[in-house]
Amino acid sequence: MPQHPLAIKIAGLGKYLPEKIVTSAELEEQLDIPSGWVAQTTGVVSRRYASGETVSQMATSAAQSALCMAGMQPSDLDAIIGASASVQQAIPCTAAFVQRELGAPDGKSACFDINATCLGFVFALQTAVHLIAAGVYKNVLIFSSELATFSRNPKQWESAVLFGDGAAAAIVTAAQPGEASALWHSRFVTYSSGAELTQLVGGGTLHHPNDPATTPEMNMFDMDGPGVFKKAARLVPPFLDEFSKTSGIKNGDYDQVIPHQASGHGLKLLTARFGFHPERVFNHIHERGNCIAASIPLALTEAVEAGRVKRGDKVLLLGTGAGLSVGGLAFTF
Amino acid sequence: MPQHPLAIKIAGLGKYLPEKIVTSAELEEQLDIPSGWVAQTTGVVSRRYASGETVSQMATSAAQSALCMAGMQPSDLDAIIGASASVQQAIPCTAAFVQRELGAPDGKSACFDINATCLGFVFALQTAVHLIAAGVYKNVLIFSSELATFSRNPKQWESAVLFGDGAAAAIVTAAQPGEASALWHSRFVTYSSGAELTQLVGGGTLHHPNDPATTPEMNMFDMDGPGVFKKAARLVPPFLDEFSKTSGIKNGDYDQVIPHQASGHGLKLLTARFGFHPERVFNHIHERGNCIAASIPLALTEAVEAGRVKRGDKVLLLGTGAGLSVGGLAFTF
């Protein structure tokens, strides 16, 4: 069903990047990987690693920048949505800790977390947009903050070198009369036939941390990179066809495409096909790696910082995530 | 801001209860607790314990019953929202596993999880209602499936004996012309000053399962029962005043109140004050215990089964959750 454009605006964006830069050469030495393999296989030349930061600290710092850009105070927030694969702790939701660390008033905002791995931010954005359009909330903070490197499996080269740490945040609110900002369309589909392609089988009830049968490997990422690539390459084209048909926006009409920084190969596939203008597809995987749910909002924030996304521009957020899910959200910034 | 009633309907409800019944007398013997202490302190006489079921199996069973009541097939679902504190595994979301086990078609529905501990179902219901009202989805499955007993700390009597396992599911869709079903109002507020009152500090990045400093106790519930009760007793009255003012519904006007089955004392507090009719406040904590996020939908399902909630009845879902959050959702069934 076509959705009418909704007068919603991303009023602020912010990021937090840990200071520590880890090069692929360093990782190749540490993990005994042949020289040059990492950049060639994943497209990542360097990425950030946290050194002591918590998920909530990184999220709070990104949120402060986003509030500043929006010209808002923490007390202006009605809801805080955590949208990260990395949670601070199992209970309560990470959003509650961010409320406190941000100095958002006790009892003023509603806090909850959404988990859809790499698509978490985009799912949360769809949720926020419709809650705002319905008048439930006025100003919503969404953050994605990932300590992806905590769950690396050094024996699985491809995923071990792919991930980076970082956080990004967005303030979502209603567009004012005369502003072009709007949501055009959003769509997600999950292909659970691919649920095992990207997994972290621990951290839940199936392999509880206190179960003596739980091994350290179960608490680490397990990714079948070529399998994900193959499945995504098959699923994304019909997804985009349907997305374009329903939204009425042609792929060539976007001023900027912000894809999930899944892998170098994935980004190349996206740039080379589908009628996108290659110079309008944002790619910073070489210096950020894959930051899971933080990837898309971090790329959007850096695209705005670089002047590649300006007010009034038509933008497509697009990605795949564990599940396996494919998702997109089209909006005017 | 007052929300207009939205023509949304809970078309189906379902539950799954593990067969194994564990009495408080058994737990008193196992944990060396004085006889009679459990029922007196928590109000729980017996609760269910899973014996081999997974979170996704319990959720799928509950979802099958909910689909049956709604007269729908798994292929009718456009979105599946997991709303449990107990996840199957860290990645991907539990909803993806339920899509597969339910036989919902690959690539037809969007899957994601929401975490707000005990209020997860109600947060997910608010989300589903507005996504349906906006035309994004037609039929949404929400499930809450809890293996709460996996994280019991036998040294902390009050929480160890309080929890039970179980699952519940709901199918949410648009009400048809002539049907009374509607959402009237929903509201949530989080008081992060109480974030430490109910915690599970493990299971995330702060105390990663592979961190040698993570102790088994960190992977277990930690609850300050009297602290939660005291804070909730102070926060719920003004919350209900505001809720009533905004919704325009007096507390005495509800046909049934479905509270989170937090504790016997909590339920007594709710029954005795605020102008609710005591006989219209649903309470089955004596035989279910606290099933975390599954508590509210399980109570709603059993209230419908018992004929205490009928089509056209005005119902209030009300609870507190870790965060500390207070939330309510008023609807016509």
Image: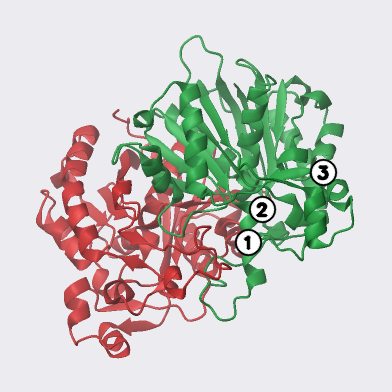
Chain colours: A red, B green
Q: Nearer the viewer, mark 1 or mark 3?
A: 3
Which of the two residues, B39 or B144, is positioned nearer the viewer here?
B39
Label 3 amino acid? Gly
Question: Quick one: SS at disc 2?
Answer: loop
Q: Dot 3: few (<14), some (14–19), or many (≥20) neighbours within 10 Å?
A: many
Whether residue B43 appears in this view of the structure is yes
Q: Residue at x 66, y 21 (%)?
A: B309
Query: Which residue in the structure is indicated by mark 1?
Result: A103
| C-beta proximity under 8 Å, tags 1 and 3 | no
Which of the two residues, A93 or A316, is positioned nearer the viewer here?
A93
Q: Dot 2: few (<14), some (14–19), or many (≥20) neighbours within 10 Å?
A: many
Mark 2 belongs to which subunit? B
- Quadrant for the C terminus of chain B in the image: top right
Question: Quick one: SS at disc 3?
Answer: loop
Q: Position of residue A136 (x, y in %)?
A: 54, 36
Q: How many marks?
A: 3
Residue B43, numbered label:
3
B119 on left or right of A196 = right
Label 2 amino acid? Ala
Q: CA distance from mark 2 to mark 3?
A: 20 Å
Q: Position of residue A54 (x, y in %)?
A: 53, 72
Mark 1 belongs to which subunit? A
Query: Which residue in the structure is indicated by mark 2?
Result: B322
Residue B143, numbered label:
none
